[in-house]
Image (cartoon, rainbow, N blue to C red):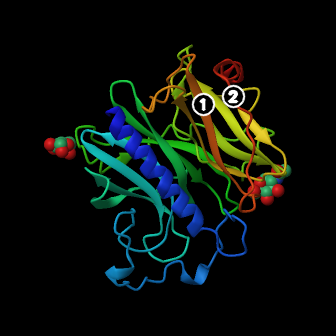
Amino acid sequence: MEIRQFLLFNIFLLVLHLSLLSNNNGGGGGVEASHKLFPEFQSLNAVRVGEVHRTGFHFQPPRNWINDPNGPMYYKGFYHLFYQYNPYGAVWGNIVWAHSVSKDMINWESLEPAIYPSKPFDYKGCWSGSATILPGNKPIILYTGIIDPGQTQIQNYAIPANESDPYLRQWIKPDNNPLVVASQGVNSTAFRDPTTAWQGKDGVWRILVGGRRRNRGIAHLYKSKDFTHWTKAQHPLHSKARTGMWECPDFFPVSGSSKNGLDTSAQGNDVKHVLKMKPHKLKTGEHVEVKGITPAQVAVKWD
Ligand SMILES: *[C@@H]1O[C@H](CO)[C@@H](O)[C@H](O)[C@H]1NC(C)=O
Ligand SMILES: *[C@@H]1O[C@H](CO)[C@@H](O)[C@H](O)[C@H]1NC(C)=O
């Protein structure tokens, strides 16, 4: 996509994320990322509210509960936005990847959910993830599948059923899923939200997966040469004591000199990287300090 579109889209997403964060506050002053459960309301039909209560410009679903934005991408003339969504009720539950498309990021068309529980590797839930455009303009979605009532989490992928369809209405979840499972020493019930992948100078793909060991928040780093076989790097990209689970990590380059957006795998002396995540344990106003990561440090961390 054009740089200007890319920037606008990023600003749009940031605002969206911030507004979702503030929706999630749930009183009490602290940012509480984990949702309160109301099983009795999860599948209770939401009443249609008056249009007067709907936002004019911010993205909203047609009705019901919405949380994380997932896998934003620009593909064949459309902005695609996926999001965690309850098709049946106004509280968190029954989560699917809902899907909307837009040509101008103001007027959105709501499509059928793109990803919903249907396979042994996601039958208890299709949670957050990301999209990566692979060489040859091939979109791929990474998402977290929940595979048991104890909420064991694994990382799956999905690909478009028809790459000629600019709406990307249908997604296939191939049988060689999952791509990543928690290895020994990784907490499998706090292991989710794979990032958009990026390529290092060595051509190897990298992703982060959010995690937690006791109270230490972690951005686990995984590497792959072929996008199919993934191995955990020896060290996480970053971690921090007493911050709790790190949800929805993102890692992306920004230019030190230009206001233009960069491609996910951009590198160079002038390029800095941003690590963003949503720690569970922060109070409003607190922040996790991540030391400025120079390209050289990033290169070391990637290996
Ligand atoms: C794929 O999408 C294109 C463009 O919308 C459409 O013309 C074609 O019929 C689709 N193919 C299949 C197999 O559905
Ligand atoms: C693993 O994650 C779960 C869910 O967040 C948490 O309850 C548990 O304490 C974690 N265990 C360890 C050893 O970190």
The percent coordinates of residue 58 (x first, y second) are 39, 63
Q: Is residue 111 left or right of residue 240?
A: left
The C terminus is located in which quarter? top right
The percent coordinates of residue 199 (x first, y second) are 53, 23
Residue occupying the point 31% across, 33% down: 2
The quadrant of the picture showing ligand 1 is: top left
Q: Which residue is mark 1?
A: 273
Residue 232 in sight in this render: yes
Residue 123 in sight in this render: no
- CA–CA distance between discs 2 and 1? 7 Å
- What is the crowding at mark 2: few (fewer than 14 residues within 10 Å), some, or many (at least 20)? some
The percent coordinates of residue 223 (x first, y second) are 62, 26
Which numbered disc flags the more N-terminal residue, 2 or 1? 1
Snapshot quadrant of residue 134: top left
Most extreme residue toward the front is 257
Q: Secondary structure at mark 1?
A: strand
Are the residues at dot 2 and dot 1 in contact (C-beta closer than 8 Å)? yes
Q: Is residue 7 left or right of residue 79?
A: right
Q: Secondary structure at mark 2?
A: loop
Residue occupying the point 71% across, 62% down: 284
Q: Which residue is mark 2?
A: 293
Residue 62's place in the image compared with 198, above or below, is: below
Residue 210's place in the image compared with 122, above or below, is: above
Q: Nearer the viewer, residue 287 or 139?
A: 287
The percent coordinates of residue 36 (x first, y second) are 66, 73
Q: Nearer the viewer, residue 69 or 30?
A: 30
Q: Is residue 57 left or right of residue 251?
A: left
Q: Amino acid at mark 2?
A: Ile
